[in-house]
Image (spheres, rainbow, N blue to C red):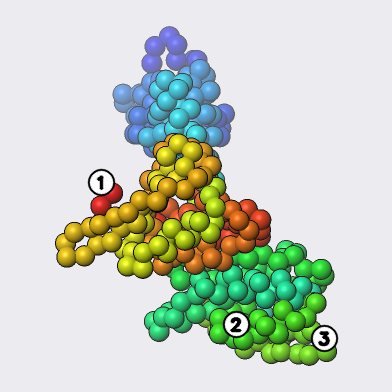
Amino acid sequence: MDGNAPQLLSISAFARRVGLAPSALRFYDDCGVLPPAHVDGASGYRFYQPEQEKRAVLLRELREADVPLPDVAVVLDGPREQAQRVLHAHLRRMLDRTERGRSAIEEILRSLPVTGSHVEARVGGAELASAIRQVVPATASDEDFPVLGCVLVELGDGEVRLVATDRYRLSIRVLHPAAMHGDPRQILVRAADLVEIGPWAARNAEVTVEVDGGAARLRGAGECRVLPLFEDRFPSYREALSALGPPEYRVIVDRLAFRDALLSRGDTSYVTVATAGDGLAVTIATAGDGSTASDTIRLEAICSGPPLRIAFDPATLIPALEAGVGPDVLLEVSTATHPVIVRSADQGSFTTLVMPVAPLSLG
Protein backbone atom coordinates (compact mmCIF):
# COMPACT_ATOMS: atom_id res chain seq x y z
CA MET A 1 0.00 0.00 0.00
CA ASP A 2 1.20 3.55 -0.66
CA GLY A 3 1.67 6.50 1.68
CA ASN A 4 -2.07 7.12 1.77
CA ALA A 5 -2.69 3.70 3.30
CA PRO A 6 -3.30 5.03 6.86
CA GLN A 7 -6.32 6.94 5.53
CA LEU A 8 -7.96 3.76 4.23
CA LEU A 9 -10.48 1.74 6.18
CA SER A 10 -10.65 -2.01 6.24
CA ILE A 11 -13.84 -3.58 4.93
CA SER A 12 -14.96 -4.39 8.50
CA ALA A 13 -14.38 -0.84 9.76
CA PHE A 14 -16.06 0.67 6.72
CA ALA A 15 -18.99 -1.71 7.07
CA ARG A 16 -19.55 -0.57 10.69
CA ARG A 17 -19.48 3.08 9.65
CA VAL A 18 -22.00 2.81 6.83
CA GLY A 19 -24.31 0.13 8.25
CA LEU A 20 -23.61 -2.51 5.61
CA ALA A 21 -22.37 -6.04 6.16
CA PRO A 22 -18.95 -6.92 4.73
CA SER A 23 -20.64 -9.52 2.54
CA ALA A 24 -22.91 -6.79 1.12
CA LEU A 25 -19.89 -4.61 0.37
CA ARG A 26 -18.26 -7.49 -1.49
CA PHE A 27 -21.47 -8.01 -3.45
CA TYR A 28 -21.73 -4.32 -4.39
CA ASP A 29 -18.09 -4.41 -5.46
CA ASP A 30 -18.83 -7.34 -7.74
CA CYS A 31 -21.84 -5.45 -9.14
CA GLY A 32 -19.72 -2.38 -9.79
CA VAL A 33 -21.82 0.07 -7.76
CA LEU A 34 -19.40 0.46 -4.82
CA PRO A 35 -15.85 -0.67 -5.65
CA PRO A 36 -13.25 -0.31 -2.89
CA ALA A 37 -10.58 2.36 -3.14
CA HIS A 38 -7.83 -0.26 -2.93
CA VAL A 39 -7.51 -4.04 -3.07
CA ASP A 40 -4.40 -5.65 -1.61
CA GLY A 41 -2.78 -7.63 -4.38
CA ALA A 42 -1.46 -10.33 -2.07
CA SER A 43 -4.33 -10.85 0.36
CA GLY A 44 -7.26 -9.61 -1.72
CA TYR A 45 -8.44 -7.49 1.21
CA ARG A 46 -10.60 -4.51 0.26
CA PHE A 47 -10.00 -1.03 1.66
CA TYR A 48 -12.23 2.04 1.46
CA GLN A 49 -11.76 5.79 1.73
CA PRO A 50 -13.80 7.90 4.21
CA GLU A 51 -15.04 9.92 1.22
CA GLN A 52 -16.95 6.84 0.07
CA GLU A 53 -19.19 6.84 3.15
CA LYS A 54 -21.80 9.18 1.64
CA ARG A 55 -22.17 6.97 -1.44
CA ALA A 56 -22.36 3.81 0.70
CA VAL A 57 -25.04 5.27 2.99
CA LEU A 58 -27.12 6.39 0.01
CA LEU A 59 -26.72 2.93 -1.51
CA ARG A 60 -27.88 1.34 1.75
CA GLU A 61 -30.94 3.62 1.91
CA LEU A 62 -31.86 2.86 -1.68
CA ARG A 63 -31.62 -0.87 -1.09
CA GLU A 64 -33.65 -0.58 2.12
CA ALA A 65 -36.32 1.02 -0.07
CA ASP A 66 -36.10 -2.01 -2.43
CA VAL A 67 -34.78 0.06 -5.35
CA PRO A 68 -33.46 -2.39 -7.99
CA LEU A 69 -29.72 -2.29 -8.63
CA PRO A 70 -30.03 -0.94 -12.20
CA ASP A 71 -32.00 2.00 -10.80
CA VAL A 72 -29.52 2.35 -7.92
CA ALA A 73 -26.74 2.81 -10.46
CA VAL A 74 -28.76 5.54 -12.19
CA VAL A 75 -29.33 7.38 -8.91
CA LEU A 76 -25.67 7.10 -7.89
CA ASP A 77 -24.08 8.01 -11.20
CA GLY A 78 -26.72 9.28 -13.62
CA PRO A 79 -28.03 12.79 -14.31
CA ARG A 80 -30.28 14.29 -11.64
CA GLU A 81 -33.32 14.33 -13.94
CA GLN A 82 -32.95 10.63 -14.75
CA ALA A 83 -32.46 9.80 -11.07
CA GLN A 84 -35.68 11.64 -10.24
CA ARG A 85 -37.57 9.75 -12.94
CA VAL A 86 -36.51 6.30 -11.76
CA LEU A 87 -37.21 7.15 -8.11
CA HIS A 88 -40.67 8.52 -8.88
CA ALA A 89 -41.42 5.41 -10.94
CA HIS A 90 -40.24 3.16 -8.11
CA LEU A 91 -42.35 5.10 -5.61
CA ARG A 92 -45.45 4.60 -7.75
CA ARG A 93 -44.76 0.87 -7.96
CA MET A 94 -44.32 0.66 -4.19
CA LEU A 95 -47.58 2.52 -3.54
CA ASP A 96 -49.41 0.29 -6.00
CA ARG A 97 -48.03 -2.85 -4.33
CA THR A 98 -48.90 -1.51 -0.90
CA GLU A 99 -52.44 -0.70 -1.94
CA ARG A 100 -52.91 -4.08 -3.60
CA GLY A 101 -51.53 -5.80 -0.51
CA ARG A 102 -53.76 -3.79 1.81
CA SER A 103 -56.82 -4.59 -0.30
CA ALA A 104 -55.94 -8.29 -0.40
CA ILE A 105 -55.43 -8.51 3.37
CA GLU A 106 -58.66 -6.64 4.07
CA GLU A 107 -60.49 -8.96 1.68
CA ILE A 108 -59.07 -12.02 3.42
CA LEU A 109 -59.96 -10.65 6.85
CA ARG A 110 -63.54 -10.06 5.74
CA SER A 111 -63.83 -13.56 4.32
CA LEU A 112 -62.45 -15.40 7.37
CA PRO A 113 -65.05 -17.68 8.92
CA VAL A 114 -66.73 -16.03 11.88
CA THR A 115 -68.71 -17.95 14.47
CA GLY A 116 -70.83 -16.48 17.18
CA SER A 117 -70.39 -12.84 16.11
CA HIS A 118 -73.33 -10.51 15.67
CA VAL A 119 -73.72 -7.37 13.58
CA GLU A 120 -76.75 -5.36 12.66
CA ALA A 121 -77.38 -2.20 10.67
CA ARG A 122 -80.55 -0.12 10.33
CA VAL A 123 -81.11 1.26 6.82
CA GLY A 124 -83.97 2.85 4.93
CA GLY A 125 -86.24 0.30 3.31
CA ALA A 126 -86.59 2.26 0.07
CA GLU A 127 -82.81 2.73 -0.04
CA LEU A 128 -82.22 -0.99 0.35
CA ALA A 129 -84.76 -1.79 -2.37
CA SER A 130 -83.10 0.76 -4.66
CA ALA A 131 -79.66 -0.72 -3.98
CA ILE A 132 -80.94 -4.20 -4.85
CA ARG A 133 -82.43 -2.88 -8.09
CA GLN A 134 -79.17 -1.24 -9.06
CA VAL A 135 -76.67 -4.00 -8.35
CA VAL A 136 -78.58 -7.17 -9.26
CA PRO A 137 -78.33 -6.53 -13.04
CA ALA A 138 -74.55 -6.91 -12.71
CA THR A 139 -74.89 -10.55 -11.59
CA ALA A 140 -74.60 -13.45 -14.02
CA SER A 141 -75.93 -16.99 -14.41
CA ASP A 142 -72.83 -19.13 -14.80
CA GLU A 143 -72.86 -22.83 -13.92
CA ASP A 144 -69.09 -22.87 -13.64
CA PHE A 145 -68.99 -19.81 -11.35
CA PRO A 146 -72.24 -19.74 -9.37
CA VAL A 147 -70.82 -17.03 -7.09
CA LEU A 148 -71.38 -14.57 -9.96
CA GLY A 149 -75.09 -15.04 -9.41
CA CYS A 150 -74.75 -13.65 -5.88
CA VAL A 151 -74.58 -10.21 -4.32
CA LEU A 152 -71.89 -9.53 -1.75
CA VAL A 153 -73.26 -7.68 1.28
CA GLU A 154 -70.60 -6.06 3.47
CA LEU A 155 -71.35 -4.57 6.87
CA GLY A 156 -68.57 -2.57 8.49
CA ASP A 157 -66.77 0.76 8.68
CA GLY A 158 -70.11 2.51 9.12
CA GLU A 159 -71.38 1.30 5.72
CA VAL A 160 -73.51 -1.38 4.16
CA ARG A 161 -72.18 -2.24 0.69
CA LEU A 162 -73.93 -4.28 -1.98
CA VAL A 163 -71.56 -5.52 -4.70
CA ALA A 164 -72.16 -7.61 -7.82
CA THR A 165 -70.10 -8.53 -10.86
CA ASP A 166 -70.38 -10.63 -13.99
CA ARG A 167 -66.62 -10.13 -14.72
CA TYR A 168 -67.39 -7.53 -17.39
CA ARG A 169 -69.26 -5.17 -15.10
CA LEU A 170 -68.94 -4.33 -11.42
CA SER A 171 -71.71 -2.50 -9.54
CA ILE A 172 -71.36 -1.09 -6.03
CA ARG A 173 -74.00 0.66 -3.95
CA VAL A 174 -73.08 2.09 -0.55
CA LEU A 175 -75.72 2.65 2.13
CA HIS A 176 -75.10 4.74 5.24
CA PRO A 177 -77.04 3.17 8.13
CA ALA A 178 -78.88 5.21 10.71
CA ALA A 179 -77.28 2.89 13.27
CA MET A 180 -74.80 0.02 13.19
CA HIS A 181 -73.02 -2.09 15.78
CA GLY A 182 -71.12 -5.35 15.88
CA ASP A 183 -68.13 -6.87 14.13
CA PRO A 184 -67.54 -6.28 10.40
CA ARG A 185 -69.01 -9.09 8.31
CA GLN A 186 -69.63 -10.00 4.73
CA ILE A 187 -72.20 -12.42 3.39
CA LEU A 188 -73.19 -13.74 -0.01
CA VAL A 189 -76.87 -13.77 -1.00
CA ARG A 190 -78.30 -15.13 -4.25
CA ALA A 191 -79.54 -12.35 -6.48
CA ALA A 192 -82.91 -14.07 -6.88
CA ASP A 193 -83.45 -14.06 -3.10
CA LEU A 194 -82.68 -10.34 -2.91
CA VAL A 195 -85.01 -9.55 -5.81
CA GLU A 196 -87.81 -11.37 -3.98
CA ILE A 197 -87.17 -9.34 -0.81
CA GLY A 198 -86.88 -5.97 -2.62
CA PRO A 199 -90.62 -5.09 -2.78
CA TRP A 200 -91.06 -6.03 0.89
CA ALA A 201 -88.14 -3.79 1.88
CA ALA A 202 -89.57 -0.88 -0.13
CA ARG A 203 -92.78 -1.02 1.95
CA ASN A 204 -90.86 -0.52 5.20
CA ALA A 205 -89.61 2.85 6.41
CA GLU A 206 -86.62 1.10 7.99
CA VAL A 207 -85.12 -2.35 7.71
CA THR A 208 -82.61 -3.87 10.11
CA VAL A 209 -80.04 -6.18 8.54
CA GLU A 210 -78.84 -8.76 11.08
CA VAL A 211 -76.03 -11.27 10.70
CA ASP A 212 -75.54 -13.67 13.57
CA GLY A 213 -72.99 -16.45 13.14
CA GLY A 214 -73.94 -18.25 9.93
CA ALA A 215 -77.46 -16.81 9.67
CA ALA A 216 -78.80 -13.55 8.26
CA ARG A 217 -82.22 -11.91 8.35
CA LEU A 218 -84.06 -8.68 7.73
CA ARG A 219 -86.48 -7.15 10.24
CA GLY A 220 -89.02 -4.44 9.56
CA ALA A 221 -92.47 -3.43 10.83
CA GLY A 222 -92.71 -6.48 13.07
CA GLU A 223 -91.84 -8.90 10.27
CA CYS A 224 -88.72 -11.01 9.81
CA ARG A 225 -87.37 -12.26 6.50
CA VAL A 226 -84.60 -14.86 6.46
CA LEU A 227 -81.75 -14.30 4.00
CA PRO A 228 -80.44 -17.68 2.76
CA LEU A 229 -76.65 -17.49 2.57
CA PHE A 230 -74.41 -18.85 -0.17
CA GLU A 231 -71.00 -20.25 0.75
CA ASP A 232 -68.30 -19.26 -1.72
CA ARG A 233 -65.46 -16.79 -2.26
CA PHE A 234 -66.47 -13.57 -3.97
CA PRO A 235 -64.02 -12.03 -6.49
CA SER A 236 -61.58 -9.56 -4.96
CA TYR A 237 -63.32 -6.43 -6.21
CA ARG A 238 -61.36 -4.04 -3.98
CA GLU A 239 -58.14 -5.12 -5.68
CA ALA A 240 -59.70 -4.26 -9.04
CA LEU A 241 -60.67 -0.83 -7.73
CA SER A 242 -57.23 -0.13 -6.28
CA ALA A 243 -55.59 -1.07 -9.60
CA LEU A 244 -57.41 1.72 -11.42
CA GLY A 245 -55.26 4.68 -12.28
CA PRO A 246 -56.43 8.28 -11.97
CA PRO A 247 -58.87 9.27 -14.73
CA GLU A 248 -57.33 10.92 -17.76
CA TYR A 249 -60.69 11.68 -19.33
CA ARG A 250 -64.08 12.75 -17.96
CA VAL A 251 -67.30 12.89 -19.93
CA ILE A 252 -70.65 14.20 -18.65
CA VAL A 253 -73.57 13.42 -20.94
CA ASP A 254 -77.36 13.12 -20.80
CA ARG A 255 -77.89 9.66 -19.37
CA LEU A 256 -81.15 8.78 -21.13
CA ALA A 257 -80.10 10.32 -24.47
CA PHE A 258 -76.92 8.22 -24.31
CA ARG A 259 -78.91 5.09 -23.50
CA ASP A 260 -81.45 5.77 -26.28
CA ALA A 261 -78.62 6.22 -28.76
CA LEU A 262 -77.29 2.79 -27.84
CA LEU A 263 -80.78 1.30 -28.17
CA SER A 264 -81.48 2.90 -31.55
CA ARG A 265 -80.39 -0.29 -33.33
CA GLY A 266 -81.16 -3.69 -31.93
CA ASP A 267 -78.46 -5.58 -33.83
CA THR A 268 -75.50 -3.61 -32.50
CA SER A 269 -72.17 -5.45 -32.29
CA TYR A 270 -70.34 -2.68 -30.45
CA VAL A 271 -70.39 1.07 -29.98
CA THR A 272 -67.49 3.46 -30.27
CA VAL A 273 -67.55 6.61 -28.18
CA ALA A 274 -65.33 9.48 -29.24
CA THR A 275 -65.00 12.97 -27.80
CA ALA A 276 -65.28 15.73 -30.34
CA GLY A 277 -64.93 19.24 -28.90
CA ASP A 278 -68.04 19.97 -26.88
CA GLY A 279 -69.81 16.80 -27.92
CA LEU A 280 -69.75 13.04 -28.03
CA ALA A 281 -69.83 10.97 -31.23
CA VAL A 282 -71.51 7.62 -30.62
CA THR A 283 -70.87 5.24 -33.51
CA ILE A 284 -73.08 2.17 -33.56
CA ALA A 285 -71.45 -0.66 -35.49
CA THR A 286 -73.08 -3.79 -36.86
CA ALA A 287 -70.93 -6.61 -38.19
CA GLY A 288 -72.01 -9.36 -40.52
CA ASP A 289 -71.03 -11.24 -43.67
CA GLY A 290 -67.45 -10.04 -43.31
CA SER A 291 -68.39 -6.35 -43.37
CA THR A 292 -69.19 -3.68 -40.81
CA ALA A 293 -71.89 -1.00 -41.13
CA SER A 294 -72.15 1.93 -38.76
CA ASP A 295 -74.25 4.96 -37.85
CA THR A 296 -73.03 7.92 -35.83
CA ILE A 297 -75.15 9.91 -33.38
CA ARG A 298 -73.85 13.14 -31.89
CA LEU A 299 -74.70 14.13 -28.33
CA GLU A 300 -73.95 17.27 -26.37
CA ALA A 301 -71.43 16.54 -23.62
CA ILE A 302 -68.89 18.13 -21.32
CA CYS A 303 -65.52 16.52 -22.06
CA SER A 304 -62.18 17.00 -20.35
CA GLY A 305 -58.82 15.48 -21.15
CA PRO A 306 -57.16 14.70 -24.49
CA PRO A 307 -59.22 13.28 -27.40
CA LEU A 308 -60.72 9.93 -26.47
CA ARG A 309 -61.94 6.98 -28.51
CA ILE A 310 -63.18 3.88 -26.72
CA ALA A 311 -65.46 0.97 -27.57
CA PHE A 312 -68.08 -0.89 -25.51
CA ASP A 313 -70.35 -3.88 -25.73
CA PRO A 314 -73.86 -2.36 -25.46
CA ALA A 315 -74.97 -5.36 -23.40
CA THR A 316 -72.74 -4.16 -20.54
CA LEU A 317 -72.97 -0.39 -21.00
CA ILE A 318 -76.76 -0.06 -21.35
CA PRO A 319 -77.59 -1.71 -17.98
CA ALA A 320 -75.02 0.54 -16.30
CA LEU A 321 -76.81 3.60 -17.69
CA GLU A 322 -80.27 2.28 -16.84
CA ALA A 323 -79.25 1.59 -13.22
CA GLY A 324 -78.21 5.22 -12.76
CA VAL A 325 -80.21 8.01 -11.19
CA GLY A 326 -80.78 11.54 -12.46
CA PRO A 327 -80.48 13.18 -15.86
CA ASP A 328 -76.71 13.03 -16.27
CA VAL A 329 -74.02 10.37 -16.19
CA LEU A 330 -70.29 10.81 -15.59
CA LEU A 331 -67.76 8.56 -17.30
CA GLU A 332 -64.24 8.46 -15.86
CA VAL A 333 -61.64 6.81 -18.09
CA SER A 334 -58.01 6.08 -17.27
CA THR A 335 -57.14 4.35 -20.56
CA ALA A 336 -59.10 2.91 -23.46
CA THR A 337 -58.34 -0.63 -22.21
CA HIS A 338 -59.04 -0.27 -18.47
CA PRO A 339 -62.45 -0.43 -16.76
CA VAL A 340 -64.49 2.75 -17.11
CA ILE A 341 -66.16 4.19 -14.03
CA VAL A 342 -69.80 5.09 -14.64
CA ARG A 343 -71.28 7.37 -11.98
CA SER A 344 -74.64 9.01 -11.55
CA ALA A 345 -74.20 12.72 -10.99
CA ASP A 346 -77.20 12.70 -8.63
CA GLN A 347 -76.10 9.66 -6.60
CA GLY A 348 -72.47 9.36 -5.66
CA SER A 349 -73.14 6.23 -3.61
CA PHE A 350 -73.66 4.09 -6.72
CA THR A 351 -70.76 3.20 -9.00
CA THR A 352 -70.46 0.82 -11.93
CA LEU A 353 -67.27 -0.31 -13.66
CA VAL A 354 -67.66 -1.35 -17.30
CA MET A 355 -64.97 -3.11 -19.31
CA PRO A 356 -64.33 -1.64 -22.76
CA VAL A 357 -63.90 -3.96 -25.72
CA ALA A 358 -61.60 -4.24 -28.72
CA PRO A 359 -63.90 -3.65 -31.70
CA LEU A 360 -63.45 -5.32 -35.05
CA SER A 361 -62.00 -2.06 -36.35
CA LEU A 362 -61.28 1.33 -34.91
CA GLY A 363 -59.73 2.57 -38.11
Q: Is residue 86 visible?
A: yes
Q: Which residue is mark 1?
A: 363
- In this picture, is 277 found above or below 144? above
**How far is the residue under mark 1 from the one under mark 3?**
59 Å
Name the residue that disc number 2 marks. 195
Q: Pointer 1: residues within 10 angstroms few (<14), some, or many (20+)?
A: few
Residue shown at 54% from the left, 71% from the top:
164
| Badge 3 element | loop
Residue type marked 2: Val
Q: Label 1: state its secondary structure.
A: loop
Secondary structure of the residue carrying numbered label 2:
helix
Question: Relative to 110, is 341 on the left or the right?
Answer: left
Where is residue 3 drawn, in percent x and y? Answer: 43, 9
Q: Which is nearer the eye, 70 or 92?
A: 92
User: 351 and 25: which one is in front?
Assistant: 351
Circle 3 residue: 221
Instruction: Determine which quarter of the picture holds residue 75.
Output: top left
In the rendering, at what x and y percent does residue 184 appear?
71, 71
x%, y% of residue 235?
Answer: 50, 70
* Residue in the picture at 43% in, 58% down: 261
Q: Is residue 360 above or below residue 275?
A: below
Give the mark, 1 or 3, whose residue is nearer the N terminus: 3
Other-residue count near label 2 (Cα within 10 Å), few / some / many at <14 / 14–19 / ≥20: some
Separation of residues labelled 1 and 2 (CA atoms): 43 Å
Examine the rendered structure and indicate whether residue 267 appears above or below residue 254.
below
Residue 249 visible from this viewpoint: no
Q: Amino acid at mark 3?
A: Ala
> Does label 1 or label 2 sit earlier along the sequence?
2
Q: Do the residues under discs 1 and 2 have CB atoms within 8 angstroms?
A: no
**Residue depicted at 48% across the width and 56% down the height:** 258
